[in-house]
Every structure is written in structure tokens, then in C-alpha cells.
Image: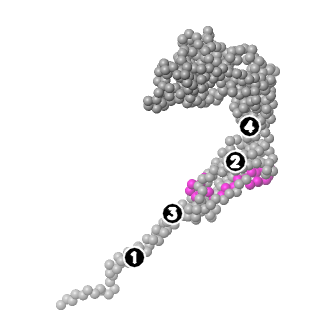
Amino acid sequence: MVRRSNEKVKGGANPLNAKNNTFRLGILILPVLILVGVAGFFLFKRMEGTPPAVTLALATPSLGASQNIPLTVADPKSGIRKVTVALVKDGQEIVLLDKTFASAGILSGGVTREERLEIPFEPKSKGIGDGKAMLRMKVRDYSWRRWGNGNLTEQEQEVMIDTRPPSIEVLSKPHYFAQGGAGVVIYKLSEMCPKSGVLVGDEFYPGQAGFFKDAAIYMTMVAIDWQQGPNTPMHVIATDLAGNQTRSGISHLINPRTFKRDQIEVSDNFLEWKMPEFVQQVNAAPGASNLDIFLKVNGELRRANYDVLKKVLSKSDAQIYWKGEFLRLPDAAPRAGFADTRAYMYQGKKIDEQTHMGVDLASLEQSPVPAGNSGKVVFAENLGIYGLTVIIDHGMGLFSTYSHLSHIGVTVGQMLAKGEILGKTGTTGLAGGDHLHYGIMIYHTFVNPLAWWDPQWIKNNITSKIDALNQP
């Protein structure tokens, strides 16, 4: 008889127990593996080797009597730990900034990943004299590299300490102006200055070098706004590479002028004729009346058009293209004067008031329009209330404008000779009849064109002063 038994053979293995033991071991090892993986990840992350970025944004390598040194530091991976900025001069190192940034915890690095710093710097207060020096910048991050000291970026920049403001010598004399008029100021600087010019009240007119043989001599065309009276102050200002500024007064005389006041009748026929072409330009509301559109055109659009003029006329070639008196539209009768204050009347009531900044000249319809003087075309397109407009740069900040044209025959960048035809008169823009709106501008300021038609005025106020300095 064969006996069966459920007992294990002594010394034999139970497969079920082996599986259970393997499972238990896996359960115990898995957390360890996860922990090791997480630790490895954090170790890899915190041991990153990318150094911090440093950007020194000095406009020039010159440092003046007082300014802030703009410095940007960044470390997106570990965060900024410490920034040190020092000035090295004559064998001495003077610390300007020593700043430590907060930590977000041992596993997270620094709280600050990017920072823009403005470091105050006044050389005299720190006993630093003028001359060459070195800016030394050191930035550390919160990386675990270098035994926990982090990645280090070191950067140096040569600078020039200059605390002396430029000197100004006004060379042109005398300075007689008319209210609403123009003139020239010539001055000499003791050093190169990236910004200089003449302040008339609060209006700035930039000076330009290069016209005279002496590169230190600058010339500025200046304007007296029609509202600036005899008490308007006038100064030459100059700012050098280090930011030091000098302001020098100009001995001058402004003769007062009284300008005309006028009334303009706004008729329904005019509104029905003109306003439809302006609907899109002023974004008129649906159903807006012609009168509502006119008020937006005469106000908002007029101001927007002037902003365009200021942008176009902000730069001028540093040479004089023009010569002698300016030409006026041939056989033309004056219709409106410079700085006429116009009260706009509708059905017996005053609805608006604006100032006419130019002269209106009327001849035959679509009369050829000559360039007032030689120069370069800098604008030739439609300009809102001015209609089709051409602007000529005559150099050194002097411009002439031609508006309400029916046709433009020139292109931007084209050089024109005095008297060369640039277009034809018309009724474009806010014109009630065929005429030329002619203007003279000194940079952003309209001045009285009548003076520029007078050869004696040009000689006395402009060319004689320039010629005096051009002589050997």
C-alpha cells in the first residue's frame, strides 16, 4: 500500500514562501529606491553649475558727480546669494554695495532669482577723485557647488570718473527776437556733450556740431513761440558723457507782438462737403452729426496731427541746405496770417477756438507750388486737417511746410532746389477753398514765415552771425 502524505519532504523548499519573501523585500527596498531617487534629483538640481548673469547698463563709461549705477543680476536655477560691487582706483578698493539675499530653504535655493539694482554713487562723498577707475562686480548663487559656496561670476568694467561740468561760451551776439520769431545761437563747449542746446522757457532746441571747422562749436536754430513774451528766459544747457550739466544764461531781447483775432463762419454747406472724409479719421460714433465730427476734427485730430509733425521734425540734418530769402507762392494773395486766433461760429454761436499756425496764400486753382528754398523732403502724404502735405528739411532744425495740396509731385528723401515745383494747391484737409497753407517751423515750433521772405532780416539775424564765425 502506498501512503500519501501532505507533509513536506525534509529539506525541501516552499515556492509560495519564496514569493512572499521576495514581495516583502521589494516593499522594503522600494521606499529606499524612491528616497535615493529623490535625493539624487535634489542633489543634481542643487549642484547645478550655471553661474549667475550680470548686466551693467551704463549709458557711457563715464561716471559723474552724482548718479545711480544700474546693475541687473539673475540666477533662475539657484537664486542670488550675494552681490558685491566695488570701485578700484589708485590701488584702493572702495565697496559700493555688499548685499546678501535671503534663502528659501536648503532644498529651494535663494528667494530672489532676478534683481535690478540702482547703486547710488557720489565720488566726492567717498573721497574719490577724477580719473580712470575699475568697477569690480562679484555675484554668488545658492548652488551647492564649491562646497556650498555656490557658483561665482566676476566682472570688471573700466570707467572714467568725471565730476567737472562742461563750460559754455556763447559766441553769437546780439540776440534780438520777435515774439513768434526765430534766430540762431552759436556756442562753444569745453568737451564733447551728447546733449546740448537752447532752452527757450521750457522748450528745448538741440544744438548740432559739425557745421564749423572747430568741432567744439555748436549751432542751434531757436524759436520764440507766439505765446512767449519778453520775459521768457533763455539758456544754453550742456550735459557731458558723465551726466554733469551746465546751464548758462543768454543775454537777449524779445520784442512783443500782438496777433490778430478773427471769426470763421462754419456753414452747413461746408460741413456737408467736408465732414464725410473725416469720419474714419476721428472714429465718429454712428449717427454723429456733422457738427460733432467737425469739433473732433478741429480739436482731437488737430492735436494728433501736430504730434505727427513733432515726430517728423524731431531730427534735422547738420548742414544748411538753404540760401538767401525763401520764395512765396507766385501771384498769391494772403488770406490768413500767422498766429491768427480764430473763433469758429455756427448759427451765431461760438463753438470752438484755435490758432492758425501759418499763412494762407491763394492764387489760381491748382497753382504750381515752388519749394521755398533748397532742402530734403522728409514728409509727403496726407496729414488730417492739413490734407496732402509736403515738409522740407532745410537743415539745422529749419523746416517749411506746404499743405492742402491737390497733388504731390515729390517723394521722401528727394533733394529739391529752391523754386522746384513740389505739388499743386488744392482743397484737401480742412480747407474751405483752393489755397496753400504755408508754414515755417523750427523743430516743433511754428514761427512767422514773413521774416523768411525778407533778405535783410535773414542777413541780420542768421547769416551774418554764421559768416562771422566761418571767417579765418
Helix, strand or loop for disc 4? strand
Up/down of 16 relative to 459, above or below: below
Confirm whether residue 410 shows in the render.
yes
Q: Give coordinates of residue 249: x percent, y percent.
A: 79, 32
Query: Start and end of the magenta stretch?
Result: 74-95
* Labels 2 and 3: the sequence-earlier one: 3
* Labels 2 and 1: the sequence-earlier one: 1
Q: Are marks 2 and 1 in contact (CB under 8 Å)?
A: no
Amino acid found under the numbered disc labelled 2: Ile
Q: Give coordinates of residue 198: x percent, y percent.
A: 73, 31
| Nearest the eye: 54 or 228 | 228
According to the picture, the residue beneath numbered tag 2 turns out to be 69
Per the model, the C-alpha gap separating discs 2 and 1 is 64 Å
* Labels 2 and 4: the sequence-earlier one: 2
According to the picture, the residue beneath numbered tag 3 turns out to be 41
Q: In which quarter of the image is the C terminus?
A: top right
Helix, strand or loop for disc 3? helix
| Nearest the eye: 428 or 97 | 428
Per the model, the C-alpha gap separating discs 2 and 3 is 39 Å
Q: Which callout, 2 or 4, points to the residue nearer the camera?
A: 4
